[in-house]
Image (cartoon, rainbow, N blue to C red):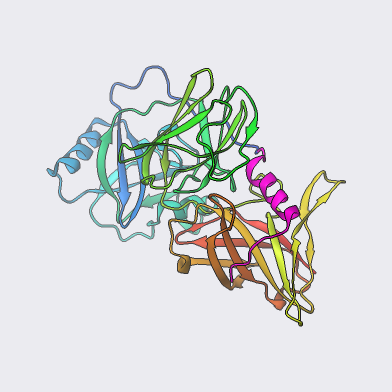
Amino acid sequence: MNWLLNRAGYLALLVSALLLGVANVRTDFKTSSAAAALEEAYFVFDSPPRRDLFVIKLTDPVKIQKARDALSGKEKDARHVSGRIVKQSACYNAPWSYHLDPQSIEFFSVAIEVCDGAMGYIESHLDDVGGALLPGNRWCSWGSRLVREITPPVCNDGVKSVSAASYRRAGLAGESIVAAFGADLATTTEAATTLPLPTALGGTTVKIKDSANVERLAPLFFVSPNQVNYLVPLGTEPGLATVTVTNANNKAMVEETQVLTIAPGVFTANADGRGAPVALALRVKADGSQQFDPVFRFDPTQGKFIPAAIDLATDQVFLVLFATGLRGVAPSTIEASIGGGFAEVLFVGAAPGFAGVDQVNIRLSRGLIGRGEVSVVLHADDQNANQVTISVK
């Protein structure tokens, strides 16, 4: 059930939301001090079979030596990582919105506590950490393993990349659409007008060097002095990565970040990752005819887009969502909930005519009639996309 969009008005709305939206992005990322502590070391751990990585900072010489012993094979038992979650981003642990308190980090062999959790799941449920999820903020990743020691990361405020849909930092995945924010990213404002997308706009380019040390030019949607929207190139390996934005004057802005396996995000009408989604209601009438209607409308009183009421009384209606960052997960693992209840996902795949855009078709149950505004959440593997809102008569 992959319904093609053939109305110029809808395409124009989608292009506007996908390419030109400006977000209110957090800028309070911490920078490193000029002089590092005498005893300071950084290590990376993963948790197979997932390929996502987490960086920890150690300041205790004894713990630093334990970590090095685990990497060398000298320590064969206590190789898993535990610590207390701090609900703040740390510049050395991009792109996660949390890190481990260096003083709390320990290494263990076996844990019986209810303190396990995947990195992406914790990111999606960070507000719940400390309550029913990971009481006391204690995280002991049972499958974690140290994979290497890295040099002290360079922390700067030059450029920050986020999902162009959810505006989360944990939003970079293969073939996903990304918005980078900074200063002097371009000397002009220009939007791509053709497919395939160009790799240079107004003299600005974006290069991504992935974990396999392969550097690729990123296709570009839009450039301006403070924002560049780009597509993570096909073939980019998950893992620690370097993003370099170079403007027409050859000024380069560098970001140390991470490309994740998946980074689900739903596009929203206000281009802020919240509220009404950039989505369509497909109405299938009794005579077999079809009608597409947007599920958002502009409210001049509030000066923003709000959910448009969907009538489910007579026709069968389907919600057509547009997202990004889903390419790395099997469609069969994608689920949805609407108003807190299960919703049937009928199709997940590339949206026709849009680079990097994923389409998700969901059946709207008549059980939603009269509910008013309800939340819509996509569940992809162990992560949730940003929550969006629709309205049902």
Q: Which image quadrant: the N terminus?
A: bottom right
Measuring from the top left, give residue 245's x and y in whole percent: 49, 28
Q: Nearer the viewer, residue 293 or 83?
A: 293
Identity of the residue furthest to the bottom in this view:
286
Measuring from the top left, give residue 157's x and y in whole percent: 51, 26
Q: Nearer the viewer, residue 247 or 117?
A: 247
Q: How many marks?
A: 0
308 horizontally vs 319: left or right: right
Up/down of 65 relative to 84, above or below: above
The residue drawn where x is 63% and y is 51% is 267
* Residue 135 seen in render: no
The residue drawn where x is 76% and y is 74% is 312
Up/down of 197 relative to 142, above or below: above
Q: Which image quadrant: the C terminus?
A: bottom right
Q: Is residue 5 magenta?
A: yes
The residue drawn where x is 83% and y is 46% is 302
Q: Is residue 380 magenta?
A: no
Q: Toward which corner of the image does residue 229 lie, by quadrant?
A: top right
Q: Nearer the viewer, residue 53 or 239?
A: 239
45 horizontally vs 169: left or right: left
Identity of the residue furthest to the right in this view:
301
Up/down of 359 relative to 44, above or below: below
Measuring from the top left, give residue 292's x and y in whole percent: 74, 65
286 horizontally vs 116: left or right: right
- In the image, which residues are magenta? 1-22
* Residue 192 seen in render: yes
Measuring from the top left, give residue 208's x and y in whole percent: 42, 36
